Image (spheres, grey):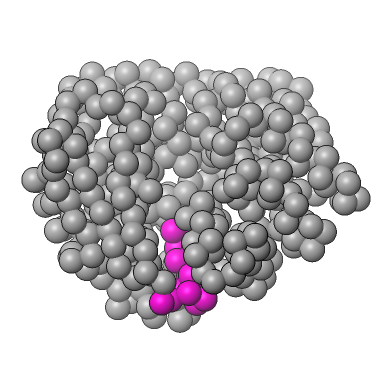
Amino acid sequence: MTPVITSLLDTDLYKFTMWQALLHRHPQTQSEYRFVCRNQPIYPLAELLPEVNAALDHLCTLRFSEDELAYLGGLRFIKSDFIDFLRIFQFQRNFIRAWAEGDQLLIVAQGPQVHVMGFEIFVLAIVNELYFRRFDAPAALASGRERLAVKVQQLQDLAQQATLRHPFELFDFGLRRRYSGAWQREVVQTFATQTPQWFKGTSNVLLARDLGLVPIGTMAHEYMQSYQAHGVRLRDFQIAALEDWVQEYRGDLGIALTDTVGMDAFLVDFDMYFAKLFDGLRHDSGDPVVWGEKALAHYAALGLDAGTRRLVFSDGLTVEQALSLHGHFADRVRTGFGIGTQLSNRSEEHTSELQ
């Protein structure tokens, strides 16, 4: 079987940034991650079990190469002791188990968080790619390229529109739900070469390195949720998570995720201190317009110029939705749009998630 994962850089940047922060502050934490398929697959995922186990076996043989470590070490927010940790890191097969119950594919990673948290993106990419390998690849790629051409044209047409205060900026966030690694590479390379004025980077660290792009990412729900079990008062978990992030990165990676327990509860904790220290906020659930207006109202109430901040939207976006949101907000605040499934897969159906 052709391996799905061939490099440990083939994951999202925020896995490394969360990994470093948690390694430095909570290395003793034990955790469990469970695979969840959110959609009804066309055929039972249990049929993939032998291939999934083979792919996991292969994943657990991989190590970071010296050139990969040199690339990561060249990112100014990655610290030398974390590189030392990655130099000796290897996924342990006994920390992850896959089995079938009826038609269901079950995958659980359990152990020290700093040893199992990295499984997440790789497991999702493995299951998705193995699933789609059973379909008609020529037809799928032909359909994907047609859709890709439409999206590229939509961005190229932006050059003919009136310029708003802040430009449109698009990022690829498609690794976890991609059709395949090869297809994600083709999509990212196409946007990078044909729409460079609008396409500003990818969350995929391997593609960022190989294609000379900016790697994009800060924190995910995993980071914020971990602090609900880290010994602080539950009421204070967001404050503790944000404070540790500030101390870890000291001005870098300044986009905070807002929806772990809802935007309203987040804004109660996101006071003047954090609003000045973080560059902006990321939306990942709920009505994006309502969310954005709440963010702008919060900055206004604090007396801060929203034009110096950024709102990043990343909740199941299409290019059309991103353009619409840009038109709504871009005269008042810098925006960014991370699009996943709609770039890296041929449809929104039959994707999977590890939680």
Say left or right for 308 vs 259: right
User: In the figure, residue 159 lies in which quadrant?
Assistant: top right
Q: Is residue 321 magenta?
A: no
Vertical arrangement, residue 312 with respect to residue 115, above or below: above
Residue shown at the point (64%, 73%) measured from the top left: 247
- Residue, x 21% and y 23% (percent of image)? 42
Report the front residue among 183 and 49: 49
Left or right: 260 in relation to 326: left
Please name the residue shown 69% across and 35% down the image.
291
Q: Nearer the viewer, residue 64 or 126?
A: 126
Q: Position of residue 136 (x, y in %)?
A: 18, 22
For image coordinates 49% across by 65% down, the residue present is 229
Instruction: Tell me, yes or no, if residue 111 can be seen here.
Output: yes
Residue 296 appears in which quarter of the rendering? Answer: top right
Q: Nearer the viewer, residue 326 or 117?
A: 117
Q: Main secondary structure of the magenta part?
A: helix
Residue extending furthest toward the right? 303
The answer to which image quadrant residue 277 occupies is bottom right
Q: Who is closer to the viewer here, 238 or 131?
A: 238
What percent of the width, then of the height, locates residue 93? Answer: 18, 64
Total numbered labels placed on residues in the image = 0
Residue 27 position (above or below residue 289):
below
Q: Which residues are magenta?
A: 14-28
Q: Quadrant of the N terminus?
A: top left
Q: Is residue 300 left or right of residue 14?
A: right
Question: From the viewer's perspective, is residue 149 above or below residue 24?
Answer: above
Residue 83 visible in this rendered orientation of the protein: no
Rendered location of residue 18, percent (x, y):
49, 63
Residue 345 percent coordinates (x, y) = 36, 30
Q: Is residue 17 magenta?
A: yes
